[in-house]
Amino acid sequence: MKKYRLLVYLIFFYSLMTGQERKLNNKIALSSIPGYKTLKCDFHMHTVFSDGHVWPTFRVREAQHDGLDVIAITDHIDYEGYPDEIKNDRERAFEIAQEEAQKYDVLLIKGAEISPRVPPFHNNALFLEDLNNLPYGYMKDTHHKFIMKDDIKKRDLMAPFLEVKKQGGFVIYNHPTHMPNYDWDKAGSKDLFTPFHEELLDMGILGGVEVVNSTRYNSMAHRIAEKYNLTMFANSDAHHDIASGYKDSHRPMTLVFAKSKSADAVEEAIRDGRTMLYYNNLLIGRIREAEPFFKNAVSLNSKKVIYKGSPMLEVQITNKTDATFDLKFSSGYVIQNLPLQMDHLKSQGKLSILIGPIWDYPDKIDLSMNVDNILISPENTLTTNFVISI
Ligand SMILES: [Zn+2]
Ligand SMILES: [Zn+2]
């Protein structure tokens, strides 16, 4: 009896241990594009060092838990949440997080959020050298308040961006929004992409835009990305813990296609615009990345079959990733088993389509797929073609 009880305890503790291991890294399997690694990234989050509610090490643990490769903690340079408790040293959040990141598999990028309530509104700066050198002369009071000066000089608003340029940083226009009401929908893209933004763009300072921020896709931001050829981002902008904000889905991620997992490689990829966004079951990207990404995610197998007395081609489509795909097929033939010519490909799932009847088999058949959950512009989803040899 004692032996039996010991065995039960052992199984219990073993399951606890293995359970914990599994819990510490919920890596989502995704596709890549030829020549590059897919890095899952979140370049926008806050800690108690500005208006967030968590300690920097917690952000690293969360990232490890969620299977992220790269994060940036981007506390506001112009707001202090706990001025009486925490000394205003903007390097501290990075230093504390860095110590934790080195224990794990998480690459930490140094960044900050510059957040005036007037143009150019909120922007993240990444790949910085010294966060304490960023000026915020447009502010009157940052001590648990956000009060800007009454008479703000353009020079003061420009100053932190010039410093970012000096430090070789990269700027992302965050959650393009109508301030101060954070109104996403009422403004036209012209109001959101202001002359200040044009100037930052012309000076080579602004290079990216957040198309997804926390739980929202912003079609206006997507249009801005297209029009000004900006790198697209999907970031959490987390202020509280991630887990409670994303109970039904994974956190939003910027997928960066980089040559390796290093800060230099991430920066090179970002400057070249090699990103896709993964948000709920939606993937957003430019066709240059989206098409090879999807083609790498699936494999196709075909065989000739007789179905209800007619010759057909059965094509099996296998999803090698954890993403899902909503597919609509077209070929010169009817898809016999799908009356609407469409189906849902589950994560790591398979589906079979029956093309025909084909009375006279050609050498090859073109099978076109529209992927309804991969957005390649605000209006268009990905359509791609597979050639099936018979
Ligand atoms: Zn912001
Ligand atoms: Zn933010």
Image: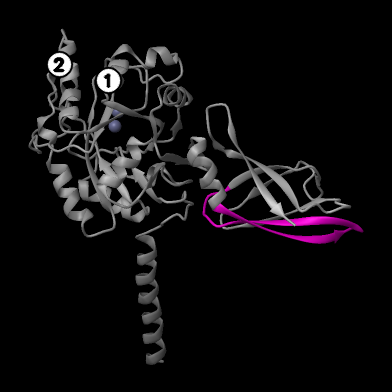
Q: Residue furthest front?
A: 363
Q: Quadrant of ligand 1?
A: top left
In which quarter of the view is residue 10 placed? bottom left
Mark 1 — residue?
200
Tell me the element at label 1: helix
Nearer to us in this view, 269 or 284: 269
- In terms of secondary structure, where does tag 2 sit? helix
Looking at the image, is mark 1 or mark 2 nearer the viewer? 1
| The C terminus - image quarter | bottom right
Q: How would you rate the neighbour count of disc 1 (Cα within 10 Å): few for under 14, some for 14-19, many for 20 or more?
A: some
Residue 311 included in the magenta stretch of the image: yes
Q: Which residue is mark 2?
A: 156
In terms of image quadrants, where is residue 51?
top left
Q: At which x and y percent is residue 269? A: 35, 41
Q: Which residues are magenta?
A: 297-324
Residue at image coords 39%, 12%:
191
**Which color mode does the image show?**
one colour
- Residue type, mark 2 in image: Asp
Tally of marks: 2
CA gap, disc 1 to disc 2?
14 Å
> Dividing the image into 4 quarters, which one contains the N terminus?
bottom left
Work out whether 198 lies above or below 135.
above
Task: Provide residue 368's location: percent of width, then percent of height.
Answer: 68, 42
Q: Earlier in the sequence, mark 1 or mark 2?
A: 2
Give the amino acid at mark 1.
Leu
Q: Residue furthest right?
A: 309
Q: Return the x and y of residue 114 as percentages of the image width and height.
A: 22, 26
Q: Residue at x 16, y 10 (%)?
A: 153
Crowd band around label 2 with a 10 angstrom C-alpha radius: few (<14), some (14–19), many (20+): some
